[in-house]
Image (tube, coloured by chain):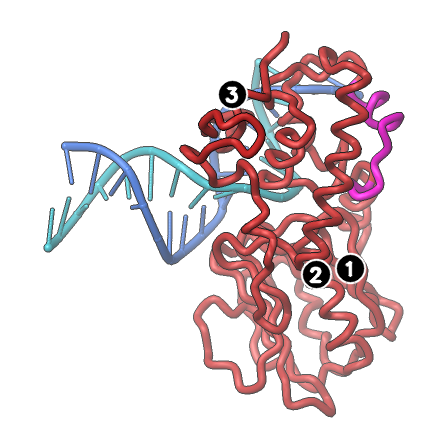
Chain colours: A red, B blue, C cyan
Amino acid sequence: MPELPEVETVVRGLNQEVAGFSIKSVTHIAAHLLKRDRRLKNLKGDTFSHFSRRGKFIIAEMESGRRLLLHLRMSGQLLLEERPRRDKHDHIVLSLANSTRKLIFRDVRKFGVFEWIDGEQQKALDRLGPEATEVTSAELRTLLHLSARPIKAFLLDQHKIAGLGNIYVDESLYRSRIHPLTPCRSISNAEIGRLARAIRYILRTAIDKMGTTFDSYSGVNGNPGEYASYLRVYGQRGEKCARCSAEIVRTRVAGRGTHYCPGCQKLKT
DNA sequence: ATTCTCACCTGTTAGC
DNA sequence: TGCTAACAGGTGAGAA
């Protein structure tokens, strides 16, 4: 599932391959996206000038001055293809001027977002917490403060920290040796320091590896990410912990499948 | 204000 | 084997 490193990889690909290209025609646009934003009909003729990322959101700045907000959610993909074979999950297909390739927004589960930025979309962006790649231990300490909620729920909350999802939360907690159910307020300063460092390190490493392909994720050219082989706990149930050899377990925390090592991530309350 | 639960979707998998 | 139910997970609306 696309989290910060996967979205960052897509944005880099878009800046390399799509920035500067104009939309020659809208080959296909799905009804459910038009229903969300009627103005998507007027994509034609505008030019992509630059792509950026905020949390897991993608922002496309257009030459007209308008901006598009894209979100891949669970299964969204942005793909560049030469002669795309029509897939029933393609919801937007854009023909680019002076290019043989088409830009495709494919999304099996239809949770993805593709709409012009207006007051409502801007508000959603403004509500996001600090970028997870940049989070400092001082910031984290302030945010955790007196909260009794489990650290895993906190780290998944985009309004607290933006960019982490289920995979990288589990990996960050493992690296900093913190049990996912630990109440935020019970986490020591030393642990907060380890956690902030772990989050930054893991996200940066995963960006270097162009993300994790577990299921369907790929970059704009269809290339899978290479971080899957570096995962220490996510999807590793039953495997031996690399640090203490205990068996990695999978439970449910904050409604999500949660992986951790019972040997080196002890719960304190 | 904060935090929790559920709906949104559909392909895949577990269980009978 | 074939069916159904549960599951996967990011987000926001509404409830507690």
Majority secondary structure of magenta residues: helix
Was residue A10 drawn as part of the magenta stretch in this picture?
Answer: no
State which region is magenta. A131-144
- Element type where label 2 sits in the image: helix
| Residue position for label 2 | A9
The answer to whether A24 appears left or right of A241 in the picture is right
Q: Earlier in the sequence, mark 3 or mark 1?
A: 1
Quadrant hosting residue A127: top right
- Along the line of sight, which residue is nearer the eye, A151 or A27? A151
Q: Identify the residue shown where x is 53% and y is 39%.
A: A234
From this viewpoint, which residue is outermost toward the top?
A269
Chain label for disc 2:
A
Q: Earlier in the sequence, mark 2 or mark 3?
A: 2
Q: Are marks 3 and 1 on the same chain?
A: yes
User: Where residue A4 appears, x then y in whole percent?
Assistant: 70, 49
Q: Identify the residue shown where x is 79% and y is 43%.
A: A133
Q: CA distance from mark 2 to mark 3?
A: 33 Å
The answer to whether A252 appears left or right of A47 in the picture is left
- Element type where label 3 sits in the image: loop
Chain label for disc 3:
A
User: Where residue A71 appears, x then y in whole percent?
Assistant: 66, 55
Q: Residues within 10 Å of mark 1 (few under 14, many from 20)?
A: many
